[in-house]
Every structure is written in structure tokens, then in C-alpha cells.
Image (spheres, rainbow, N blue to C red):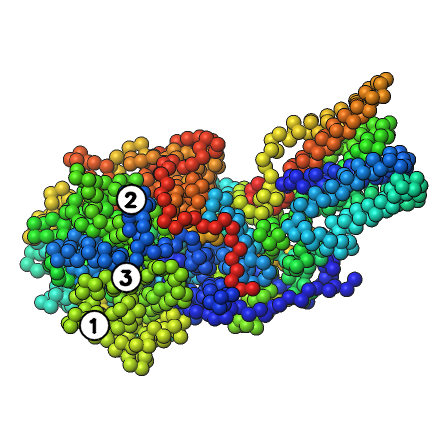
């Protein structure tokens, strides 16, 4: 019988228009093509979202979240109008009000604070992508209490990187995916820079190059690792230092690189009694000195023709100075770092550690290669080739979120430096505006004056005790106690401490808490139940302890019910944004790039972009910086600000299409057509780095000059990698009794112990952990972003609830089977949750997906949604403070250097609670919240086109 | 497989209906007039009722007529054509018997063959599926045919024949279970063949399903609930479907009324036993797609 | 007619690399988005914001754990997790086509794509029953069978730039674990990949002759086995007389322009 097949339309029209903008389904900032189709009413609607092939970040690919954006834009959880609380906090009782009234209320609360004491406003923004703007607003308001969410995210990684190499992972840099032959990944990293890393892994895999995953959990990227190291959580630093030990012992280190580009040859004062002990020997200009191997004499490290001696030493009077490198050899060659000595604590056999060290050595040195590219270094020396060391490393949240995370991140960078891979072909490459030496960043500012702006940017990098944010009486200047002796290098602030400090009135009381896009009464806080109590707690006179709370969010999150005034934000397709070079841009190793969002659709609700609301509030209060001298407003909305604001003459939020003709890059006058130009260009701007400038950037004059041209620096900023971080030593010196600013007695020993200028590993505080022996971790599914995925009809089908994954050994030990319930307790709390077996898991570690559990009544979900019944948070088990010590003091559950929230230090106890039918809901269950938006429709068959 | 009431009803009822038509077409009993009307009403009620029930399980029942097109390859299409042909032919035959007091034996034989063919084609819908090893056995059509004939004989009042046919059907049922319980293993399809993973003595385990929620495949193909009662239900099916009816038929009874009552009881018992058997036929059938979910 | 074509001009299909898939579900949702807006009825979702959300998806990512057997070299080998995307394999001998009573299911002569002509589908479900791979899902809102179309409305679509004429899952896959091409052409990139990496069929015993192939995961956790080969790399260089500084001095001398 002849085969008659139907005619299929193989060339249907894909859409009526493509609008290109930037994704915001997570923080990765991929470029997207939003396909629009005209609906029956003649209005263009979002029909389909795909990746933008021309975009520097994702080059066309897009993750599950990005493709599901259409379900976020139609999500029933979107807030509809400004809300004023009418019931008690937490009840969810609101009335809708107009924007005029909302702004009136907000300004009515804020203006008196500004006149009286601006620090009474605590302004913290969560997953904010406009920090250079929100920080500018806070600075002009005058409060010192501003930060975003970095403190509970990955500040250890960022700060350790900046202090050590002048950059870090994610937006600071990336592996050289095209050349690397060995990629080593530490800890959970799926949650940042996700598409670029997946693309990079794909490139490596296509070449058959080796991937080593170091992670207690073999999921995600670790599932495709050729070799998996199921390490004991919190011991990465020890493992890395064992690798350092092996490599140094075998001499498999890049001596040439170390002597030229790092402070390994810099001389350090060894006089035990000197106030300068451990500080660098410097010349009269303050330039660190080395021994010039050519002459055997002292020389500034950056002198033309100098050949710094790694083994140099210098005696002046009776004071000996030795090189940093000798101090490193002294320390890391010690047997305490030998593989055998660390194997048991790390849970990695010594042979395995040795095999990995050997493989690192083999690839870095035996597989070294050359790029035929001349370049000139900062000392004026010409190199006719670029030497590649094809070993690349990456880490993010996993190693960061421990109380020893800063030193671990430092150790990781030191390991890379010893192999000579940072900024070498095949290794780790910076993305503009990095590399950037720590000295080029501002120091923190905290001087508050009524009715005046703050004395400078809030956040920055301290170079010693003189930069701490302390009041004249030595008490913390900031509500979150950032930049204090408790955590001197807290460069991102400590958002996770704000509510508990404000509630306790410690260090002082505040009046208004103003937050943006941070689900603090749920998954963004440790100790969720406690935070809810603090938000609703009242004084003896019946007033809330935190008197006023303003919150902005686009969605009906758990936090909404705890605010007094809600300023509803738009979704990401309805707004202007700029992903700015002043902030956290989208650059790639081969080019500087920034991007915008623009309203590809108009909101169908009475909502406004949060940044525009800030402009409107600023104008209402006539904040300096937002106001011309004649009292008129500089900008009407955020788009106006993006185009016309200049941070310095010629430098504004966007680097592209500047100048009157729109043909200037980096520097140039504001261009009124700038946003249109961006839209025509696909929503982004990219300026490529010349080939001779593409590697060895911190020392490469071609790069330095290019960066100055683009406005990234005002003058060339070559620098040395800091194997030895002198500012840390300055804090140790203070703790040893030197200098005017002295730490409180109870912190002296801790500062001496932890602020070591060379990377160390220490066990995190185990106070109160007796009997709690199992490590408990969380990670974020690649298809979900924090709490956002659950409101998405497509994504919530992938992850509608979260079991606690237990290794086979613990399943057997506790007689558990899949679906059984376990009681999981910590020194702080207890939860009862369903379990599931996972064999590919460190056998003393349990874990679950983060932020799948939801509170009943939120996110537009029905109350019996699995997120609200079976889903759960591990947060209930984690406290922001450690259990009380003998002296009654409770230290923060944070890294003592940066204040990074130590989410991953959690230890728990597991007991079987029952069979699957014994419970219907995870415990604890919290009362339902009244939804300000109702719930979504029963069924969906979403199709815009015909 | 999901034991959908619509397919259980369909295969059970239409099996009886067409079984009865087989006997009526062959002239057992050779009835006419009102008596014929009653018999044909029962037969058509069961056969057509079953066919109608089957349409409840369609996503687009209004398009059911399109199902007749692909008889060259599709057993479902063949079944539809066979069923319609059988109903038409037997309809003509019944018209003669009821209204004209006439029987056309040749037509009756054709109708009987078509009726039996309908049952056979129904069974082949299941038998052809390699994806369900328990169905993909020559015994599957034997089960359907033997059940249909036994039920038909019982309904047609052919008691002595019915006893033998019931005994045969009961034996077939036992053989089917015996062989079916080994079928999945015998098929050679395993999680390893489904995924190509886990060679060299490794053990392979399904970890997380693709979605935390359920889906069409799990609803349709993975039916675990109720299987734990399978042995009990098999005993019930065997006793109700075959042993009790045979006993009711062979017990010596004098009273005609009691005899008829017992025959009626035998019919009811048999039908409920077959329905239970049919529930098990679906509920115990394991689709290979379950291997991807670590479930069967 | 739903007889299978005896041969197809090309055998278009996917090659899925199990060594590279990180299980991110990007392909799953991209597929959902494209196929909701394009070919046939939208892929609906029931109880979308409720207790038991269930929707139609044409591509789903499973995961399996492999526990290798213990060997002398590795007495306690680590378990492995393999992500396993699965959609229609566009079989050469597709049982879903022949069982279809209406002719709605068919395999295209020109490229071998198995499609459902939705206007002829009665939603009987038999094709889904006959598919060993779970590639077909009945959409509860539309009442018709949905399946992967290999993006037949993309791969020839003249309204798309040529580079985009690939299935939506392939275009979006961040790790490049999905490849698309003509598996009937032994010289095609996908055929070469299958050859080089020992690409395999799923359930070959079913006789369905799937066009889509899977590249098996590469051997894992082999580094420790090579420790003897690697060990010389770590021979202590710094324990000679003179210790570390002695070694350093000599090593620095060896650097170009290094001697003091």
C-alpha cells in the first residue's frame, strides 16, 4: 500500500517579534530572546523564551529556569498593588493602597530618621543586581547600614580572592575552558554562573579532559566528574594544604611565576619583639622589597630588570627578614600537612591525595604548552610566548559557607598560584574589571551625619584595624557589626545578623528596616522560627521591637506578611535594570561586557520597578546626589538614572554606546539614546580584549593600558599576588597588643589563631555539638533559584518536595527505607522529614535541596501543595549564634574573618521517626498565612499563538 | 498497568456478549420469537455495552469512527471492524429469528466466526505488546477465547458444554498465571538493558524520578497499589469464576426453579470471577517503562 | 496508513552523551516551552499550583545510581550517579506506529521522524502502551497523544536562522550533551561520535531499532589506579642535602637568566 503521510507545516512563523533582554530567573544574567506573539486583543504577549546566541554569557544556551520564565511572568503569585498592613504582623492582613499613599507613608517614616539619625534606617537588599545604585541611594540617605546578601552567600570566596589574587570566581573570573586539560571543582558550585560552567564542562568533556570533583555529594557537576573525592565537609582547606605539601616537597611548583608575579620573594620582618613583626620590608615609598638575585641586594619588587629571589633574606641590625616563600616552605613542608596526617580527617585515602597531587603536577608541567603571542610585563620585560599551565580550578558556595571558609578559599588560590595557573593559558582567567588589587578598592565607610550623605561607600576592604567600622567608644558602627573585631574583613556586610541585632537592640536600636528581595522570614535566614518571633516581638508598651518594616518584592513570598508596607516590584520582563561595570557586570575573560533589562512587556498590575521607586522616594526627600542645586530632581526614574548618572566624569552605569554619537566605549558623556542602542545590540555591550592583553593581565601592560582606556582604572594597576596577606597580619599584631585600636579581650586569642597571613586550616567551632556527628548540607537544584521556582507551574513539577538524602550506611544504621520519616535534630532544633537513600554520597553526610519547602498560603500555591506539606527547610536546625560558651558569650555562627554565614557547618543527629503512613506533613508545620494574591488556576494550557 | 474500569468492563462484558453470540449463531439454543429477543438483547447489551465502555477510555471519543481505518497493521482497528461486522451479521441473523421466525444457518456460522474473531482481535491488542511481557504470550488469546466461550456457553444455557468449557478456562487461567509470573524475567528486559548502564558486575538502581510529581506514564503503566492482595484475588477469581459455577451446574437438583436459580447464580459467580481475573490481568501486568522509574 | 516505511531517506535523531549530562533539566523545560507554543495542542498542566501538579512533558531526565563491583585495586569503589535524559527515540521499527488504529501515528519517509497527526488521534493510548521507552504522553486537556517531534517545525524552519534549525533541547543544552543529525549517514558528525564513543541502543532486545543513540559514561575514578605511574612525579626534590633552600637555589639557577 502506498504510504500517504500528512503534510506538516515545517516552516511555521516562530513569532511576531523578538525582544532581547537579560534573564533574571537566577543571578547568572544570561541573554534571552523573548519571542512575542500578538494575541486576540492585538497586544503582544510573551510566547517563548530562548537563549541569545550572541550574548557573551550564555551564547545561546539557556537553563530550565530561563526557559520557564514565561511561567514566572504569568505566575499567580505576583503582587498586584502596594499594600498597607492592617492586621498584626504575620497575619497577612493587608489593604491595597495607591502608590501616592505608599510613597507618602515611606517618606513619612524615613525623612525624620534622616534629619535625626540616618543610621536608624537599616537598608538591606537581597538578591539585588543593582548594588551600585542601591548603595548610592543608601549613601545619599546617610545611613551606614546598607549591604546586600553576600554575607550569607559567598563572601568568603569573593574576599579571599580579592585579597589574594585581586579577583575570584564567577563574575571575577573563569577557567580557561578552551585550553585546560585538568579541571578541579571544589564544593557545590551549581548555583552560580551556572550556564557558563556547564558550557565549560561540556567543552572539557568533548575533549576528553579530566574533571576532578571534590564534594561530599556526587550530584550535578560531580556526577560527571571523572574522579570524585567525597570529602568530609569543612576539610577542603586541609586537603588543599596536603596537595600544597606534596607539590612543594616534590618541587613541582612554578618558581619563575612565583618570583615574578607573587609576593613569594617579598621580605618579611622576623623580629619577635617588633611592632612590625610579620610585616613587609618596604622602601621609603612604601613599596615592598625583595632581594634582587642579579645583585644580591634589596630592590623594590617592581623595579625594571629586577630578578626577585625566592630564597632571599636580609638582616638589618639584628632584625632578620626572610622571603614569604621561606615562611611557606617552613610551614607547608611540615609533616602535619602530609597526606597520611590529613587522610582520616578529610575522609580521603592518602594514596588518593597523592595521586591527585601527582596528576596536578603532571598536567601543569608535563602538559604545559605555549601560545605564540608576545607580551610585555609591568617591569618592561618582553616575553615572546605565553606559557600555558592547563590546570584550572573552581569553587563557590561549597567551600565558602564554613567558618573556616576564608582560609580555605585562600588556600585554594595559593595552590593555583604555586602551579602558576592563574592568568596563564589553560588556567584561571580574570574577567574585567578584574584583575584589581585590593588597594584599588575603597575601604569601608561608616561616619553618619544627620541630614548629610555618608562619608563614602559602605562596603570595601580593610587594610588593617584602622579601617574597622567602629565608633569612637569602640562599639560597632553598623547594625550588622560588619568590619568589627568579630569579623574584620566582612566586605559584603552581614545581612543575616540584621534582624537579630535590630531585635536585640545590639549594638543599638533602629527605627525602620527596609528590605528588598530577601525572604528573611523563611529560607534566607538561619533559625527561621526565631526570626519570625523577632519580627513580631513587642516591647512592654506593645510596640514592635523592630518598629517599622518596609519590604519590596515582586511575589507573594513568606516575608510579605511580616512587613508594614509592601512596595510591589515588577517581574524581570517588565523593568529596566543595568548589569553594570560599576557593580557585578557580565564580562567574560575575552571582553568587558555589561547589559540591561528593559520592559519587553508592560505590567498588568499596579506595580513599579523597585529602583524607580527608590528614585521617587529620593526625589520626595530631595536626597543629595539625586537633587540638583536648584532643588529639582536629577532623574525621574531608574532608566533616566542609568542613562544620565555619572559616577565620575564620563563614567556611568553603562559602559557601552557613550558620548553624543554613541560610539564611545567605557568613557564618554551620557548618551540619551544609550538604552535604545543597547536594545538594538541585543541588550548588551561587549568590548573585546586584544590578543596580546588576554593573559597575565595583572602584569600585562597591554591589558593595563586597555583597562585604563575603557575606564576600569584611572591609571595602570599592576600588582603582585598575595600569597601572604599583610593586612591579616596587622590584625594579629593588634591582638598581640600592638597599635592603638585593640580588640576586646575575649576575641584576642581567636584573632591570633584565625587571622594567619598564610593559609591555615582549623576545625570549626564544635561548641555544643556533642552527640551531633552527621554533617548536614543543602544545595540548590539547577532548575530552581532560591524560593522562586515553586511559583512556576513548570519548575515546581521537577522539584515539588525535597527528601533528606542519606548515604546507604546511615539508611541501614537507622533501619530506614525510602519514604520513611526521620527526626533530625541539631543543638538548635528538630525537624521530621521524609528520607531517601543515595549511595553516591559521603557516608557521614546528609543533604537536601534548599528552599523547596514553602509556608502554607504563600507563593500563590494551594495550602495542600507538596512544597507546604512534605517540603521542609534545614534552616530550622541552624542558628545565627553558636551555643553559649562557658563565659556566657554566644559567638556568631560565621567565619571569624569575614562573617560569612556558616550554613555548611551544621551537625545533626538522625533517628527514625516512622513509616511513610505515620506522618502526613514534615515537622515543624507553621500556621498558614493569608495570601494577598489568592491561589493560581487549577489547570493550565498556555498558548499565546494559534 | 492501570486497571481502568473502562477496559475491565469492556473486555469482560464484550467477552460474554460475543461468547453468547457465538453460541446463538451456531444455533445453541436455536431460539426464535420472544425467547430469541431475550437472548439477543442480553448478548447485544453485553457486547455493545462493553464496546461503549471502551470509548470512555478514549481521549477524543467523538473521533472513535476513525479507528476503523488501519486494519492492515492495527489489532485495535481489526477488533473494531470485526466487532461491527459481527454485530451486523448477527443482527441480521437475530432479525430473522425474532421477527421472521427464520434461521439462516450459514449466516449464523459467519456471525459466530466473526464474534469469536472479535474476542481474538481484542486479545491480540494485548498479546502483541512486547512492552508488557505478561501479555506478550500465546496464552493471552487462549485466555480470552476460553473465557468467552465458557461464559457464552453458560449464558446460552448449554450447561453440559459449559461445565467442560469452564474447566478448560479454569485450567488455562492457572497456566496463564504460572507462565505470566515468569514472563518479565524471561523477556530479558532489565534496567540494565533499558539504560545500558551497570556492566561489569555493577549494581544499578533507579535514583530520583524525573519529576517529584506523578505523570501519565506512572498513572497508566505503573500500578503497585493492590498488588499485594494478588494471591487472595487469584483464589477469589478461580473459585468464583470457575469452581463455584461448575459445582452449581453439576449438583443434582430436582426442582426446575432451583436449577434455574442455580444456573443464574453460576452466571453471576462466573461473571464476577472473570471480572476479578481481568482486574488482575491489568493490575499485575508490568510495563517495561517502569524500569526507568525503578518501579513495575 | 500506519505501515512503517520500509526505508527512510535520512534517519534524523539525537545522540545523548551520558558522560556529559549534568541533569539540569534545561532540555526538559525548553522542550515544554517550544512545544507548548508550537506543533499541535499546548502541553497542559493539571493542578498546576496545587497538591499534585501533573503536566505533559515530551522529554524527562531520569537518574540512576551505579555501584561498581569491588576489585582488588578498588575494594570500596564509589557509587556513581548518571543523569539520563529520555525522549522519543524515533525507532526504525516503531511499534507505536503500527498499533495505531487511526493512522494518526506515522513515521516520515524523508527523515524518519515519528509524529502524531493530532487531528486523527482518538486518544486510545495504545501507542503509549506499545512504546518501551515511555516516550508518549496523553495530554489530559487536549485528549490527544503528545510526543517528541524532533522539532520538525524547527529543523526545516526557514523563519529561523540556519544555525537554529535544530531541536529546541539541543539548542538549549548548556553542557552540549545533546547532538542532532542524520544517523543514517555514516559520515555525519553524529554517526562518527557514536562510532568513537561506542554509542548504544536502549532495550535492543525489543527490536525497535531506535535511531537515537546514547553515549555511555566514560570509566570513572581511575586516578588512584594510576598512582604507581604517577608516583615518580612526586619524588621528593627538596630532601637533598641543603634541604629546601638548597634545592631552591639550584632550581632558581636553572631558570632562564636565573643564576646569581
Q: Secondary structure at mark 2?
A: loop
Mark nearer the viewer, 3 or 1: 3
First of labels 3, 1 by sequence position: 3
Quadrant for residue A117, please give it.
bottom left
Return the residue at label 3.
A613
Q: Quadrant of the C terminus of chain B?
A: top right
Residue A37: x and y, percent? 50, 67
Q: Residue at x 12, y 60 (%)?
A: A451
Above or below residue C180? Residue B112 is: above
- Is A727 left or right of C189, judged from the image as shown? left
Q: Secondary structure at mark 3?
A: helix
Mark nearer the viewer, 1 or 2: 2
Return the residue at label 1.
A648
Q: Are marks 3 and 1 in contact (CB under 8 Å)?
A: no
Q: Secondary structure at mark 1?
A: loop
Above or below residue A781? Residue A684 is: below
Q: Are marks 1 and 2 on the same chain?
A: yes
Q: Nearer the viewer, residue A597 or A685?
A: A597
Q: Residue A87, labelled with which disc?
A: 2
Q: Residue at x 30, y 57 (%)?
A: A98
Chain letter for mark 3, please.
A
- Is B171 left or right of B200, judged from the image as shown? right
Residue A739: x and y, percent? 7, 53
- Is A105 left or right of A746, judged from the image as shown? right
First of labels 1, 2 by sequence position: 2
Q: Nearer the viewer, residue A651 or A276?
A: A651
Residue A249: x and y, percent? 30, 53
Amino acid at each position: 500500500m502506498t504510504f500517504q503521510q500528512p503534510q506538516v507545516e515545517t516552516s511555521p512563523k516562530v513569532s511576531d517579534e523578538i525582544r532581547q533582554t537579560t534573564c533574571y530567573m537566577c543571578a547568572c544574567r544570561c541573554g534571552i530572546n523573548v519571542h512575542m506573539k500578538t494575541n486576540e486583543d492585538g497586544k503582544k504577549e510573551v510566547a517563548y523564551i530562548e537563549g541569545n546566541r550572541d550574548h557573551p554569557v550564555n551564547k545561546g544556551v539557556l537553563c530550565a529556569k530561563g526557559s520557564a520564565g514565561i511561567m514566572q511572568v504569568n505566575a499567580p503569585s505576583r503582587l498586584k498593588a502596594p499594600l498597607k498592613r492592617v492586621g498584626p504582623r504575620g497575619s497577612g492582613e493587608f489593604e491595597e493602597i495607591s502608590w501616592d499613599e505608599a510613597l507618602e507613608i515611606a517618606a513619612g517614616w524615613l525623612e525624620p530618621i534622616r534629619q535625626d539619625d540616618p543610621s536608624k534606617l537599616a537598608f538591606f537588599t537581597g538578591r539585588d543586581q543593582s548594588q551600585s545604585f542601591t548603595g548610592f541611594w543608601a549613601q545619599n540617605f546617610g545611613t551606614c547600614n546598607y549591604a546586600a546578601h553576600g554575607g550569607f552567600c559567598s563572601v568568603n570566596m569573593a574576599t579571599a580572592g580579592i585579597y589574594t589574587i585581586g579577583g575570584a570566581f564567577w563574575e571575577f573570573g573563569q577557567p580557561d575552558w578552551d585550553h585546560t586539560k585538568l579541571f578541579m571543582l571544589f564544593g557545590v558550585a551549581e548555583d552560580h554562573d551556572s550556564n557558563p560552567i556547564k558550557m565549560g564542562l561540556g567543552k572539557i568533556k568533548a575533549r576528553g579532559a579530566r574533571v576532578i570533583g571534590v564534594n561530599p555529594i556526587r550530584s550535578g557537576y560531580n556526577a560527571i566528574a571523572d574522579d570524585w573525592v567525597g570529602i568530609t565537609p569543612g576539610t577542603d582547606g586541609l586537603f588543599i594544604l596536603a596537595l600544597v605539601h606534596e607539590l612543594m616537597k616534590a618541587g613541582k611548583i612554578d618558581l619563575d611565576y612565583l618570583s615574578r608575579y607573587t609576593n613569594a620573594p617579598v621580605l618579611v620582618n622576623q623580629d619577635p619583639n617588633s611592632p612590625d613583626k610579620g610585616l613587609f620590608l618596604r622602601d621609603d615609598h612604601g613599596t615592598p622589597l625583595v632581594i634582587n638575585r642579579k645583585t644580591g641586594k634589596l630592590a623594590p619588587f617592581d623595579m625594571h630588570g629586577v630578578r626577585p629571589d625566592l630564597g632571599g633574606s636580609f638582616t638589618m641590625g639584628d632584625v632578620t627578614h626572610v622571603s614569604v616563600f621561606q615562611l611557606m616552605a617552613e610551614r607547608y613542608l611540615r609533616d602535619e600537612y602530609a597526606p597520611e596526617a590529613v587522610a582520616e580527617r578529610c575522609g580521603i585515602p592518602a594514596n588518593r591525595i597523592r595521586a591527585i597531587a601527582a596528576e596536578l603536577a603532571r598536567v601543569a608541567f608535563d602538559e604545559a604548552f605555549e601560545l605564540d603571542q608576545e607580551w610585555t610585563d609591568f617591569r618592561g620585560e618582553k616575553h615572546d610566548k605565553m606559557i600555558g599551565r592547563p590546570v584550572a580550578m573552581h569553587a563557590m558556595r561549597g567551600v565558602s559557607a564554613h567558618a573556616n571558609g576564608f582560609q580555605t578559599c585562600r588556600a585554594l588560590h595559593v595552590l593555583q598560584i604555586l602551579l602558576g595557573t592563574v592568568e596563564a593559558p589553560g588556567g584561571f582567567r580574570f574577567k574585567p574589571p578584574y584583575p584589581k588589587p585590593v588597594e584599588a578598592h575603597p575601604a569601608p565607610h561608616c561616619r553618619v551625619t544627620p541630614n548629610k550623605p555618608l562619608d563614602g561607600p559602605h562596603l570595601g576592604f580593610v587594610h588593617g584595624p584602622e579601617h574597622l567600622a567602629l565608633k569612637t567608644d569602640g562599639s560597632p558602627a553598623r547594625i550588622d557589626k560588619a568590619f568589627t573585631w568579630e569579623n574584620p574583613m566582612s566586605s559584603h556586610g552581614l545581612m543575616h545578623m540584621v534582624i537579630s541585632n535590630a531585635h536585640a537592640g545590639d549594638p543599638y536600636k533602629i527605627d525602620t528596616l527596609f528590605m528588598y528581595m530577601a525572604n528573611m522570614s523563611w529560607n534566607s535566614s538561619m533559625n527561621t522560627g526565631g526570626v519570625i518571633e523577632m519580627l513580631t516581638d513587642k516591647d512592654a508598651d506593645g510596640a514592635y521591637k523592630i518598629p517599622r518594616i518596609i519590604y519590596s518584592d515582586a511575589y507573594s513570598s513568606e516575608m510579605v506578611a511580616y512587613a508594614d508596607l509592601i512596595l510591589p516590584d515588577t517581574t524581570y520582563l517588565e523593568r529596566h535594570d543595568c548589569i553594570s561595570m560599576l557593580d557585578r557586570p557580565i564580562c567574560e575573560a575575552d571582553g568587558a561586557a555589561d547589559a540591561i533589562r528593559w520592559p519587553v512587556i508592560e505590567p498588568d498590575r499596579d506595580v513599579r520597578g523597585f529602583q524607580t521607586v527608590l528614585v521617587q522616594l529620593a526625589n520626595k526627600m530631595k536626597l543629595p546626589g539625586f537633587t540638583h542645586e536648584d532643588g529639582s530632581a536629577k532623574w525621574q526614574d531608574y532608566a533616566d538614572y542609568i542613562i544620565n548618572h555619572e559616577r565620575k566624569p564620563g563614567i556611568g552605569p553603562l559602559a557601552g554606546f557613550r558620548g553624543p554619537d554613541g560610539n564611545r566605549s567605557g568613557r564618554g558623556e551620557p548618551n540619551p539614546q544609550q538604552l535604545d542602542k543597547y536594545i538594538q545590540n541585543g541588550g548588551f555591550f561587549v568590548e573585546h580584549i586584544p590578543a596580546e592583553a588576554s593573559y597575565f593581565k595583572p602584569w600585562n601592560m597591554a591589558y593595563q593600558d586597555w583597562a585604563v582606556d575603557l575606564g576600569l582604572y584611572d591609571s595602570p594597576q599592576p600588582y603582585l599576588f598575595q600569597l601572604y596577606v599583610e593586612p591579616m597580619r596587622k590584625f594579629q599584631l593588634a591582638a598581640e597588643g600592638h597599635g592603638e585600636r585593640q580588640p576586646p579581650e575575649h576575641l584576642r586569642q581567636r584573632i591570633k589563631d584565625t587571622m594567619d597571613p598564610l593559609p591555615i586550616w582549623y576545625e570549626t567551632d564544635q561548641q555544643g555539638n556533642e552527640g551531633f556527628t552527621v554533617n548536614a548540607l543543602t544545595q540548590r537544584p539547577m532548575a530552581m533559584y532560591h524560593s522562586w521556582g515553586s511559583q512556576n507551574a513548570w519548575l515546581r513539577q521537577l522539584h515539588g518536595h525535597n527528601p533528606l538524602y542519606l548515604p546507604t550506611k546511615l539508611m541501614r544504621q537507622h533501619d530506614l527505607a525510602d519514604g520513611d520519616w526521620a527526626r533530625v535534630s541539631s543543638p538548635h532544633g528538630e525537624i521530621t522529614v521524609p528520607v531517601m537513600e543515595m549511595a553516591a554520597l559521603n557516608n557521614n553526610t546528609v543533604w537536601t535541596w534548599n528552599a523547596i519547602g514553602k509556608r502554607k498560603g504563600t507563593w500563590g500555591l494551594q495550602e495542600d501543595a507538596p512544597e507546604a506539606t512534605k517540603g521542609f527547610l534545614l534552616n530550622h536546625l541552624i542558628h545565627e549564634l553558636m551555643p553559649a560558651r562557658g563565659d556566657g558569650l554566644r559567638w556568631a555562627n560565621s567565619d571569624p574573618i569575614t562573617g560569612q554565614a556558616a550554613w555548611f557547618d551544621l551537625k545533626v543527629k538522625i533517628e527514625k521517626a516512622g513509616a511513610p503512613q505515620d506522618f502526613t506533613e514534615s515537622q515543624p508545620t507553621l500556621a498558614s498565612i493569608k495570601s494577598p494574591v489568592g491561589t493560581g488556576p487549577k489547570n493550565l494550557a498556555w498558548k499565546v499563538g494559534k | 498497568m492501570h486497571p481502568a474500569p473502562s477496559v475491565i468492563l469492556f473486555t469482560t462484558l464484550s467477552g460474554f456478549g460475543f461468547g453468547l453470540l457465538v453460541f446463538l449463531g451456531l444455533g445453541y439454543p436455536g431460539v426464535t420469537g420472544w425467547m430469541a429477543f431475550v437472548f439477543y438483547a442480553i448478548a447485544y447489551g453485553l457486547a455493545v455495552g462493553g464496546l461503549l465502555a471502551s470509548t470512555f477510555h478514549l481521549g477524543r471519543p467523538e473521533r472513535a469512527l476513525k479507528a476503523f481505518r488501519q486494519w492492515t497493521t492495527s489489532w485495535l482497528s481489526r477488533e473494531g471492524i470485526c466487532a461491527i461486522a459481527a454485530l451486523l451479521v448477527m443482527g441480521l441473523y437475530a432479525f430473522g429469528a425474532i421477527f421472521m421466525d427464520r434461521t439462516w444457518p450459514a449466516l449464523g456460522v459467519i456471525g459466530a466466526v466473526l464474534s469469536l474473531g472479535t474476542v481474538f482481535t481484542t486479545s491480540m491488542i494485548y498479546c502483541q505488546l512486547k512492552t508488557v511481557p505478561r501479555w506478550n504470550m500465546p496464552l493471552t488469546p487462549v485466555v480470552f477465547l476460553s473465557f468467552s466461550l465458557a461464559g457464552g456457553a453458560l449464558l446460552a444455557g448449554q450447561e453440559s458444554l459449559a461445565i467442560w468449557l469452564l474447566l478448560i478456562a479454569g485450567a488455562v487461567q492457572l497456566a496463564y498465571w504460572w507462565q505470566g509470573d515468569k514472563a518479565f524475567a524471561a523477556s530479558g528486559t532489565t534496567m540494565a538493558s533499558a539504560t545500558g548502564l551497570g556492566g561489569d558486575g555493577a549494581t544499578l538502581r533507579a535514583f530520583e524520578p524525573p519529576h517529584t510529581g506523578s505523570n501519565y506514564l506512572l498513572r497508566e503503566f505503573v500500578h503497585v497499589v493492590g498488588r499485594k492482595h494478588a494471591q487472595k484475588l487469584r483464589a477469589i477469581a478461580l473459585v468464583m469464576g470457575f469452581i463455584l459455577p461448575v459445582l452449581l451446574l453439576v449438583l443434582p437438583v430436582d426442582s426446575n426453579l432451583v436449577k434455574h436459580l442455580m444456573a443464574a447464580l453460576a452466571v453471576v459467580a462466573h461473571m464476577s470471577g472473570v471480572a476479578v481475573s481481568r482486574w488482575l490481568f491489568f493490575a499485575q501486568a508490568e510495563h517495561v517503562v517502569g524500569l526507568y522509574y525503578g518501579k513495575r | 496508513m500506519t505501515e512503517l516505511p520500509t526505508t527512510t531517506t535520512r534517519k534524523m535523531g539525537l545522540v545523548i552523551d551520558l558522560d556529559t549530562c549534568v541533569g539540569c533539566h534545561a532540555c526538559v523545560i525548553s522542550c515544554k516551552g517550544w512545544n507548548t507554543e508550537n506543533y499541535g495542542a499546548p502541553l497542559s498542566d493539571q493542578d498546576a499550583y496545587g497538591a499534585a501538579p501533573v503536566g505533559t512533558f515530551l522529554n524527562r531526565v531520569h537518574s540512576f545510581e551505579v555501584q561498581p563491583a569491588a576489585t582488588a585495586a578498588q575494594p570500596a569503589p564509589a557509587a556513581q550517579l548518571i543523569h539520563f535524559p529520555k525522549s522519543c527515540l524515533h525507532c526504525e521499527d516503531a511499534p507505536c506506529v503500527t498499533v495505531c488504529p487511526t493512522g494518526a501515528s506515522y513515521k516520515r519517509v524523508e527523515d524518519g521522524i515519528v509524529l502524531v497527526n493530532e487531528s486523527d488521534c482518538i486518544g486510545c493510548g495504545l501507542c503509549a502502551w506499545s512504546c518501551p521507552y515511555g516516550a508518549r504522553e496523553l495530554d489530559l486537556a487536549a485528549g490527544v497523544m503528545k510526543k517528541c517531534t524532533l522539532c520538525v517545525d524547527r529543523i526545516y524552519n526557514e523563519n529561523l536562522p540556519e544555525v537554529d534549525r535544530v531541536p529546541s533541547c539541543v539548542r538549549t543544552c548548556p553542557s552540549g550533551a545533546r547532538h542532532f543529525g542524520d544517523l543514517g549517514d555514516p559520515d555525519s558528525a553524529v554517526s562518527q561520535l557514536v562510532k568513537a564513543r561506542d554509542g548504544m541502543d536502549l532495550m535492543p532486545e525489543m527490536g525497535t531499532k531506535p535511531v537515537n543513540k546514547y553515549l555511555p559514561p566514560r570509566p570513572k575514578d581511575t586516578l588512584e589506579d594510576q598512582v604507581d605511574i604517577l608516583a615518580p612525579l612526586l619524588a621528593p626534590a627538596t630532601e637533598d642535602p641543603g634541604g629546601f633552600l638548597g634545592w631552591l637555589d639550584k632550581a632558581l639557577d636553572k631558570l632562564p637568566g636565573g643564576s646569581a
